[in-house]
């Protein structure tokens, strides 16, 4: 059985990746310091002999005994509410954590896939965003700690690939949603569902004309799996190119939840908030044979079923 280390294993994406790779016949080592993750997301895996868990901060030296075939580096705060509250930890996991895991990949002769983000494009001047676009990022703005951590992650990953011939893969993840997102995550989908279920105002920043492109988690996980198993060492966008304004998205959530007390409310747009976000997935289609399969309507229904169970309304 191939052996894989997944960092950020107790997080939203990490836990779904643990599920997928166990299903594919891997022995999975999950690693997380629970800064933003939760053991609730992976407690169903603890009885399995194919799964082991280590509570560890990858910003410190990472040791894994025995052979290791693959590494997925998904450890990082990923929502604005988290990385604005924990800027130093966000920079450290992107820089020191990535360095440590690349060193481990080199020592173990393992293939490593690192999780980058559409945030490397910043507030883009090119739309939709292709992998060749270098971005429009404010390095000293409040979002810079996340944006630049991920840009450094990409740079050091390519350095290890070129200098040490480490087998590396880089995924640029666009907005993703689904079960196991934290209720208080701060990102738009958990916020909208929580507020709609409670009958509160759905917080729209600015006039709601800014756009996002939402990809259901199962589609993203399929893209990650295909990229890891591919021969592509250059960054690849994985996301859903079906673009929608935040205002329209809020209206979709209101219609789905059907709580008459919930309505859209408007607040000032945060600093450096991207005005548009849509992936060009030409590379994913051509190289990986991948594109999203789950419609937003279907994905939102599945996600709503989850939030109905976890959002407290009292």
Image: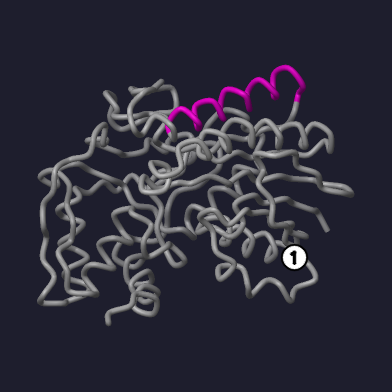
Q: What span is in magenta?
A: 147-165
Q: Nearer the viewer, residue 207 or 37?
A: 37
Q: Give me the residue at 67% from left, 59% from top.
A: 21
Q: Can residue 210 be seen in this view?
A: yes
Q: Decide if residue 37 is on the left or right side of residue 243.
A: right
Q: What element carries label 1?
A: strand
Please check the rendered image and state whether residue 105 is part of the magenta-colored stretch, yes or no: no
Q: Decide if residue 161 is on the left or right side of residue 249.
A: right
Q: Give me the residue at 41% from left, 46% from top.
A: 239
> Residue reaching furthest right?
66
Q: Give me the residue at 35% from left, 31% from top.
A: 129
| Residue pointed to by mark 1 | 51
User: Image quadrant for the C terminus?
Assistant: bottom left
Residue 126: % across, % down: 29, 25
Residue 87: % across, % down: 45, 37
User: Image quadrant for the N terminus?
Assistant: bottom right
> What's the magenta bit mostly, secondary-structure-wise?
helix
In the figure, residue 132 lies in which quadrant?
top left
Q: Can residue 137 be seen in this view?
A: no
Q: In this view, does 139 lie above or below 222?
A: above
The chosen color scheme is one colour
Residue 147: % across, % down: 42, 31
Q: Badge 1: how crowded within 10 Å, few (<14), some, or many (20+)?
A: some
Residue 140: % across, % down: 36, 23
Q: Decide if residue 264 is on the left or right side of residue 94.
A: left
Q: Give me the residue at 25% from left, 62% from top.
A: 192
Please check the rendered image and state whether residue 161 is part of the magenta-colored stretch, yes or no: yes
Q: Is residue 147 above or below residue 72?
A: above
């Amino acid at each position: 059985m191939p052996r894989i280390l997944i960092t950020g294993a107790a997080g939203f994406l990490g836990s779904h990746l643990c599920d997928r790779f166990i299903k594919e016949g891997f022995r999975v080592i999950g690693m997380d310091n629970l800064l933003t993750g939760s053991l609730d997301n992976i407690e169903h895996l603890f009885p399995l002999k194919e799964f082991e868990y280590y509570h560890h901060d990858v910003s410190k030296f990472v040791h894994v005994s025995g052979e290791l075939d693959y590494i997925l580096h998904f450890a990082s705060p990923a929502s604005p509410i988290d990385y604005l509250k924990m800027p130093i930890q966000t920079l450290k996991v992107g820089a020191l954590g990535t360095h440590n895991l690349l060193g481990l990949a080199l020592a173990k002769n393992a293939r490593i896939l690192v999780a980058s983000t559409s945030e490397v494009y910043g507030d883009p001047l090119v739309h939709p965003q292709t992998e060749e676009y270098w971005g429009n990022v404010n390095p000293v703005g409040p979002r810079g700690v996340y944006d630049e951590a991920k840009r450094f992650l990409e740079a050091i990953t390519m350095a290890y690939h070129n200098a040490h011939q480490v087998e590396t893969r880089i995924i640029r993840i666009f907005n993703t949603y689904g079960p196991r997102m934290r209720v208080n995550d701060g990102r738009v989908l958990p916020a909208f569902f929580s507020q709609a279920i409670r009958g509160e105002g759905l917080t729209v920043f600015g006039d709601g004309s800014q756009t996002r492109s939402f990809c259901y988690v199962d589609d993203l996980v399929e893209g990650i799996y295909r990229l890891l198993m591919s021969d592509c060492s250059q960054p690849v966008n994985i996301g859903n190119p079906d673009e929608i304004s935040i205002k329209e998205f809020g209206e979709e959530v209101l219609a789905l939840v059907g709580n008459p007390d919930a309505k859209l409310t408007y607040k000032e747009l945060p600093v450096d908030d991207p005005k548009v976000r849509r992936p060009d997935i030409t590379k994913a289609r051509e190289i990986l044979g991948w594109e999203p399969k789950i419609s937003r309507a279907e994905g939102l229904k599945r996600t709503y079923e989850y939030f109905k169970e976890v959002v407290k309304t009292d």
